[in-house]
């Protein structure tokens, strides 16, 4: 008997939008070959578990937007969308030291791991098969983001057609509901807003958050005005952040949005909470963030890939470590000794790499680790407040387009910037940074006291107590007798540490204290 034990999300298959798994897609007598062939054509955000006669199949989409976790214990197999529920199937679970180290350096766990070695997760573009008769687990990739050396003849025109297609799919899935765009001053969210305007979809609200005098907010307002979309500014203050961050509701979000594999991502948590409480958006609104346009277009490709033919594996792995394992200061040689073999075997890296191949490996690692497990996991915020979301900049068509664009056209987002000039002529510059004078002032403040100018540090410390705000150290968020890597300096003031590094430490503290286990998996009502 075939049963659907779990389904979340939506997907397109052969031009049809599905919000559930129908019998015609996966028949009762389904086998791995049929399952894999069908799954490769799915385009959307989803996770599902199917129990067939001889197998259990489970899959996540190409960007792991809905995570799935599993445990194998001898001949028993458990799978769940909630990693905390799987903890109940294992007694005396201990945190894995290497995974803690990696988590604190990156804000997520890598490969198929979670913080507990017994609990595993499906990665982006993966599915699993539980062979019932053999009590055997099998993991397979149905999609891997790697460069394809098939250049596109007219890439700007092709990009514009591709954008039209993904926006039309977004519109069709929205069914005239309000689309809410977290509109920053950058490229990605403005791309979505502009394409919706071009397509004639009027039911759009844009918002931003922070302080109204920030350059990013000013650019956002001007873009929304140019497109004639409603724009909402959600003011945040240190006091508001401190109260929200130390609330029971925030602790519930730690439980809901992290799943023993991702640090909490709360950048727009307070803004979404305010939008809901003040009834500034409809209850059935759909959030449409710009994840992760810059990453796929080459925004983060390191300069090391520019103007060279090849590199050795050590230089490449050190590049990965510098870019992804950087939340705390740690000598690169020590990082290399810890993670060299793990990364090398995972990506199957040869001793010498052509630059195009190295860039492909780099993008593959970024896609499956940082982008899927941390950046895209951002959507848990919208779910927590009972809103749907879409991530159109990870549509299959956009991924398959950028897979074919050579490194030379992706460095510094070169091709995309050419596209914007030709096809999205908004007379508002993209926000890059504060003014030179403000940057100098902020840099001096960071050297002397740390990130005192950064509003978000009000999450951790009460700004009204100036002495404590300036001098509270990392030791205040450490758990006695718990293993911490040597790069965690207890005497470092919190204001001098990276914000995602601090949040990873706080998550570990709440996890080992048992506070998160006491909470049920639920969203805000």
Image (cartoon, grey):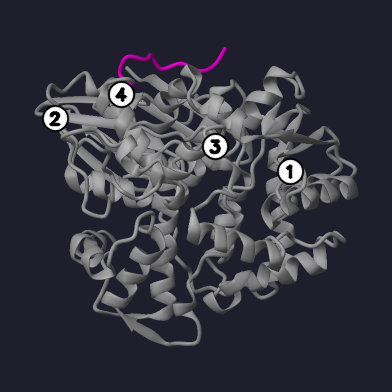
Res. 168 mark:
1
Q: Give the mark nearest the N terminus, 2 or 1.
A: 2
Please tell me whether residue 20 is drawn above or below residue 496 in the rendered image. Answer: above
Query: Magenta segment, which residues?
Result: 516-525
Q: Is mark 4 on a helix, strand or loop?
A: helix
**Distance between the Cα atoms at labels 3 and 2?**
50 Å
Callouts 2 and 1 close, C-beta under 8 Å: no
Q: Is mark 2 on a helix, strand or loop?
A: loop
Q: Give the mark nearest the N terminus, 2 or 4.
A: 4
Residue at x-position 35% and y-position 20%:
2
Q: Give the mark nearest the N terminus, 3 or 1.
A: 1
Horizontal side of residue 405 vs 347, given as left or right = right
Horizontal side of residue 393 vs 265, given as left or right = right
Q: Position of residue 83 (x, y in %)?
A: 31, 27
Q: Can you tell which quarter of the image residue 278 is in?
A: top right
Q: How crowded is mark 1: few (under 14 residues within 10 Å), some or many (20 or more)?
A: some
Q: Give the mark nearest the N terminus, 4 or 3.
A: 4
**Distance between the Cα atoms at labels 1 and 4?**
37 Å
Q: Is mark 3 on a helix, strand or loop?
A: helix
Camera-nearest residue between 380 and 508: 508
Horizontal side of residue 89 vs 446, given as left or right = left
Label 3 belongs to which residue?
458
Label 2 belongs to which residue?
135
Q: In which quarter of the image is the N terminus?
A: top left
Res. 84 mark:
4
| Badge nearest the viewer, 1 or 4 | 4
Residue at x-position 49% and y-position 77%:
303
């Amino acid at each position: 008997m075939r049963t659907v034990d779990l389904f979340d999300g939506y997907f397109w298959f052969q031009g049809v939008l599905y919000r559930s798994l129908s019998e015609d897609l996966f028949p009762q007598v389904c086998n791995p070959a049929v399952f894999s062939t069908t799954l490769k054509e799915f385009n959307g955000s989803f996770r599902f578990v199917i129990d067939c006669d001889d197998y259990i199949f489970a899959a996540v989409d190409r960007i792991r937007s809905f995570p799935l976790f599993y445990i194998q214990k001898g001949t028993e197999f458990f799978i769940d969308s909630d990693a905390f529920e799987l903890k109940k199937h294992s007694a005396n679970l201990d945190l894995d030291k290497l995974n803690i180290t990696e988590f604190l350096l990156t804000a997520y766990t890598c490969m198929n791991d979670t913080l507990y070695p017994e609990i595993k997760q499906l990665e982006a573009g993966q599915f699993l098969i539980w062979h019932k008769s053999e009590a055997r687990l099998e993991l397979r990739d149905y999609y891997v983001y790697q460069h394809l050396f098939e250049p596109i003849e007219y890439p700007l025109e092709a990009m514009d057609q591709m954008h039209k297609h993904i926006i039309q799919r977004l519109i069709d899935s929205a069914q005239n509901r309000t689309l809410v765009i977290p509109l920053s001053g950058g490229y990605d969210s403005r791309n979505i807003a502009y394409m919706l305007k071009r397509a004639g979809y009027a039911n759009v609200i844009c918002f931003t958050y922070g302080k109204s005098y920030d350059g990013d907010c000013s650019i956002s307002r001007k873009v929304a005005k140019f497109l004639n979309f409603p724009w909402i500014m959600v003011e945040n203050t240190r006091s508001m952040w401190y109260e929200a961050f130390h609330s029971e509701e925030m602790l519930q979000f730690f439980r809901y949005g992290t799943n023993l594999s991702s640090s909490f991502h709360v950048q727009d948590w307070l803004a979404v909470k305010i939008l809901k409480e003040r009834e500034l958006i409809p209850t059935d609104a759909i959030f449409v963030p710009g994840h992760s346009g810059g990453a796929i277009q080459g925004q983060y490709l390191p300069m090391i890939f520019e103007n060279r033919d090849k590199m050795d594996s050590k230089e490449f792995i050190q590049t990965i470590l510098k870019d992804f394992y950087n939340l705390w200061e740690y000598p690169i040689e020590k990082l290399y000794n810890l993670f060299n073999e793990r990364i090398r075997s995972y990506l199957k890296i040869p001793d010498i790499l052509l630059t195009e191949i190295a860039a492909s490996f780099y993008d593959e690692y970024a896609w499956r680790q940082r982008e899927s497990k941390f950046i895209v996991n951002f959507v848990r915020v919208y779910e927590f407040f009972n809103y749907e979301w879409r991530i159109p900049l990870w549509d299959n068509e956009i991924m398959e387009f950028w897979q074919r664009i050579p490194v030379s056209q992706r460095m510094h987002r070169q091709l995309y910037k050419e596209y914007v000039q030709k096809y999205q002529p908004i007379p508002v510059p993209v926000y890059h940074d504060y003014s030179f004078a403000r940057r100098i002032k902020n840099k001096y403040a960071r050297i002397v006291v740390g990130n005192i100018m950064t509003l978000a540090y009000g999450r951790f410390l009460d700004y009204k107590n100036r002495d404590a705000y300036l001098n509270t150290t990392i030791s205040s968020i450490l758990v006695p007798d718990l293993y911490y890597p040597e790069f965690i300096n207890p005497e470092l003031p919190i204001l001098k540490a990276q914000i995602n590094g601090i949040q990873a430490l706080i998550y570990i503290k709440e996890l080992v204290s048992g506070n998160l286990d006491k909470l049920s998996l639920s969203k805000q009502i």
